[in-house]
Amino acid sequence: MSIKKITLISNSHLTSNPRLVKEAEALSEVGFVVSVIFLQHIAELEAFDEDIIKKLPKVKFYKINFGSKNRASRYLNYKRLLRKFWIRINPKSKLSENVFFTEFKNLINKNTADLYIGHTLRALPIVAWAAKNNGTKFAFDAEDYHRGETTYEIQNNFAEIIENKYLNVAEYISTASKFISEAYRKHFELQKIVTINNFFTHNALVPREQMNNSKPIKIVWFSQTIGLNRGLKEFISNLVLLNPNFFELHLRGTSDESIRTHLLENVSTGWINKIFFYPQCKPRELSFWLQGFDIGLALEPGFNFNNEIAISNKIFQYFNSGLAVIATPTTGQKWVIQQAPDAGVILSPESNLDILKSWAEDRSNLEDAQKAALSAAKSKFDWNEEKKKLIEVIKQIQVG
């Protein structure tokens, strides 16, 4: 019997996991009955989650919320703290793998499925339990190489223990880059591993106006948070080499005053009024907002093995928005630029920001890069084609 009902499970917000959202939409569009069980822990992100839920009426969503200020969330947060204390006494408890195991279990028992797909490391024990308890199947989406995801040995060791315990019996493992797939194959040689890149659905854009030499070139960077380990500090420090009359830098993501102050501490007087900060916004709002810029920054610093081989969502969103791309030389990002070499450049210590100077001097070259980016989004980086790999691997699974 083929798969009919699928439940996707995540230990984070929907807005923090656009890959899960894309998969849920893709699977529901081809006739699967799709449910999503996810965790909420930041009150400010709940409105963004609700916006996603409204846009996917065919998908059933179930949330476990301990971040709101209502009584139920406060009580759940209280139980979370008690369970953390219990885990210290009983480290082999199921709760040590996911502190909300009980809540996930209760929702799963009410919404059985033929296939459970975990979308975060902490969701892996949950989907494995769900499949075993219901006599069905489970799979795991490794958007990151979890055992190399941090610089903390304890956390990486935890990921290795969890993956070794469960992934050998997963129906398949999907990853977000060919390099993450290669890394997992070294540990799980007999497993079916499929690469499903974080492409986005190509949308027709309003035609860009011809580049105006009198207007500043708008550079953009975004993420959920603006931090000090994102490559921004180094990039901003080098802006002193550029004429601020020709450029603007726009940064979107959650940040506080201390972060912003630290990022700007070496900024020249000419640049201080050319750097703009924006709060995190809804995914759909972000896609429209990006269309107002010229160049997208993908500044992954390669600070751990995962960051070196992963490919961030943002670089594909830049392509989809018709932006020229400037990327740091991680393995994952070099692969992307190699697929569309006319659309962007890889930064190097030698070139520094020379490309920005050249684009400012001859903006027709920048326009050519933007056109190449949009062309690549249509022909090489389109989710409408990439999602077929996910659908096909699921259609091959037999249950019962």
Image: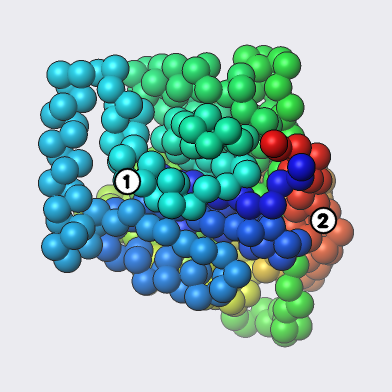
Q: Residue 373: horizontal and vertical position, in percent? A: 77, 61
- Secondary structure of residue under mark 1: helix
Q: Residue furthest right?
A: 379
Residue hosting label 1 = 103
**Colour pattern:** rainbow
Closer to us: 118 or 6: 6
Locate residue 77 relative to residue 342 in the image: left or right.
left
Residue 183 numbered mark, or none: none
- Secondary structure of residue under mark 2: helix
Q: Of the residues under marks 2 and 1, which one precedes in the sequence?
A: 1
**Residue at (80% x, 39% y) in the render:** 396
**Residue at (71% x, 46% y) in the render:** 3
Quadrant of residue 162 within the rendered picture = top left
| Amino acid type for the residue under numbered disc 1 | Glu
Q: Residue 301: horizontal and vertical position, in percent? A: 51, 37
Q: Quadrant of the C terminus?
A: top right
Judge depth for marks 2 and 1 and give the one in front: 1
Locate residue 7 relative to residue 378 in the image: left or right.
left
Asked if disc 2 and disc 1 are in contact, CB closer than 8 Å, the reply is no
Residue 259 seen by the camera: yes
**Residue at (27% x, 63% y) in the render:** 43
| Amino acid type for the residue under numbered disc 2 | Glu
Q: Separation of disc 2 and disc 1 at Cα?
A: 36 Å
Relative to 309, does residue 112 appear above or below in the rendering?
Answer: below
Residue hosting label 2 = 385
The count of marks equals 2
Tag 1: Cα neighbours inside 10 Å, few (<14), some, or many (≥20)?
few
Relative to 55, does residue 15 appear above or below in the rendering?
Answer: above
Closer to us: 128 or 26: 128
**Residue at (34% x, 18% y) in the render:** 154
Closer to us: 184 or 226: 184
Q: Quadrant of the N terminus?
A: top right
